[in-house]
Image: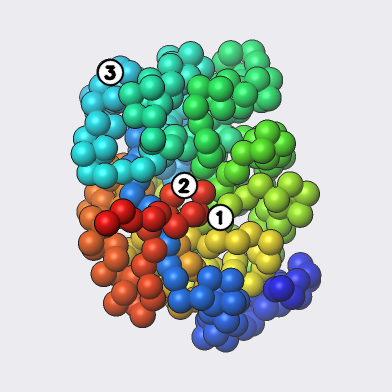
């Protein structure tokens, strides 16, 4: 049992504890929960459109419909991409997209049901709370109706993207008009009420201070106390290279501090991911000794963070993922979308 840290103490801890001190404590907690194992999944990201009504300053994935590199995939084209992923051995399709008013709920439910009918063993993870809120507005439906439609189409787990950071001050600086904290939490509460798990995220490394980090994590921890529906927390490092928003990078030590602190504060969320696409494989590897127990996955075809300037290749092989984990001194365990170990035959 992890000893709970109250918010006031947490702010002081984040401000004044060294990265090493936090790392040692977080590693102890991580090992008490997961031993020497580090999990990963064979997965792909499917981004069917980059056309977006929002104009967030921190995003370089978004395009306007008349931009030369704007796109929206037909369902048949999306299925072709999934087929390529299946040939790579994926188990999960992570579906996350821009907010395109031309692609309504019917498009997504048809896409999801087509994926499930074509590849019944694949798990579809999607959509984010932000996409669900957007669809509810353009379709004049409740959040509940959109969530239920996605589940009925075949979604088995929901991603945590779009939370950014809940601080109103920081969100103004980031220039985002995405759904605020209350809507993000409401949508995840609805998802959890259906008996479905989701992930949670936090975008960091821009304008946030210690109080705002704790505020964000406290909101997630409180909802988890209520529903128990979050499978994992994913701290997402802000990559600014190709975005209109330029901030001074805080470095790998800050990444490790965020991950270690998250492990210590989120005493009721079982898994902390080190998302290697934004961190880099090397920092993600070190993060396994600072509280993280999962590297997400092979992530075939990820576009959003790489479009922001992340200098990583579009996916890893299973062998590369295992070597990354082993070289860090941990035992690699392939998992499914529900964090169950995959049993190998033969």
N-terminal of the two: label 1 or label 3? 3
59 sits to left or right of 76: right
Q: Position of residue 242 (x, y in %)?
A: 31, 48
For the question of whether residue 302 can be seen, the reply is no
Q: Quadrant of the C terminus?
A: bottom left
N-terminal of the two: label 2 or label 1? 1
108 sits to left or right of 195: left
Disc 2 residue crowd, few under 14, some 14–19, many 20+, Cα 10 Å: many
Q: Position of residue 30 (x, y in %)?
A: 55, 74
- Name the residue: 64% across, 82% down: 16
Residue that badge 1 annotates: 232
Q: CA gap, disc 2 to disc 1?
A: 11 Å
The answer to which quarter of the image holds residue 191 is: top right
Q: Are marks 1 and 3 in contact (CB under 8 Å)?
A: no
- Name the residue: 23% across, 62% down: 319
Choose between 332 and 254: the one closer to the eye.
Answer: 332
Disc number lying in front (2 or 1): 2
Disc number lying in front (3 or 2): 2
Q: Position of residue 140 (x, y in %)?
A: 64, 13
Q: Secondary structure at mark 3?
A: helix
Q: Secondary structure at mark 1?
A: strand
Most extreme residue toward the front, as rendered?
346
323 sits to left or right of 230: left
Q: Quadrant of the N terminus?
A: bottom right
Residue that badge 3 annotates: 76
Residue 42 image label = none
Q: CA gap, disc 3 to disc 2?
A: 25 Å
Residue that badge 2 annotates: 337
Disc 1 residue crowd, few under 14, some 14–19, many 20+, Cα 10 Å: many
Relative to residue 125, is residue 69 depicted above or below? above
- Name the residue: 65% across, 20% down: 145
Q: Secondary structure at mark 2?
A: loop
């Amino acid at each position: 049992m992890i000893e709970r840290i109250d918010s006031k103490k947490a702010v002081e801890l984040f401000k004044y504890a060294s990265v090493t001190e936090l790392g040692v404590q977080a590693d102890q907690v991580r090992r008490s929960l997961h031993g020497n194992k580090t999990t990963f999944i064979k997965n792909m990201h499917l981004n069917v459109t980059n056309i977006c009504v929002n104009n967030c300053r921190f995003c370089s994935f978004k395009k306007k419909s008349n931009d030369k590199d704007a796109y929206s995939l037909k369902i048949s084209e999306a299925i072709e991409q999934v087929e390529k992923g299946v040939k790579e051995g994926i188990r999960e399709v992570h579906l996350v997209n821009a907010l395109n008013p031309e692609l309504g709920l019917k498009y997504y439910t048809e896409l999801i049901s087509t994926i499930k009918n074509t590849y019944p063993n694949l798990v579809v993870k999607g959509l984010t709370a932000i996409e669900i809120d957007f669809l509810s507005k353009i379709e004049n439906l409740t959040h509940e109706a959109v969530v239920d439609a996605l589940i009925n189409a075949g979604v088995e787990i929901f991603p945590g993207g779009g939370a950014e950071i809940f601080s109103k001050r920081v969100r103004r600086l980031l220039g985002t008009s995405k759904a605020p904290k209350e809507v993000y939490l409401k949508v995840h509460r609805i998802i959890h009420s259906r008996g479905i798990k989701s992930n949670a995220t936090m975008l960091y490394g821009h304008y946030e201070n210690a109080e705002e980090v704790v505020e964000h994590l406290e909101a997630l921890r409180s909802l988890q106390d209520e529903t128990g529906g979050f499978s994992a927390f994913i701290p997402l490092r802000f990559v600014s290279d190709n975005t209109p928003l330029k901030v001074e990078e805080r470095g790998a030590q800050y990444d490790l501090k965020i991950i270690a602190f998250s492990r210590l504060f989120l005493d009721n969320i079982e898994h902390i991911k080190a998302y290697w696409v934004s961190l880099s494989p090397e920092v993600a590897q070190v993060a396994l000794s600072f509280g993280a127990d999962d590297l997400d996955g092979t992530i075939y075809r990820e576009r959003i963070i790489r479009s922001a300037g992340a200098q990583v290749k579009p996916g890893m092989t299973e062998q590369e993922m295992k070597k990354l984990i082993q070289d860090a001194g941990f035992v690699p365990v392939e998992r499914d979308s529900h964090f169950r170990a995959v049993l190998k035959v033969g």
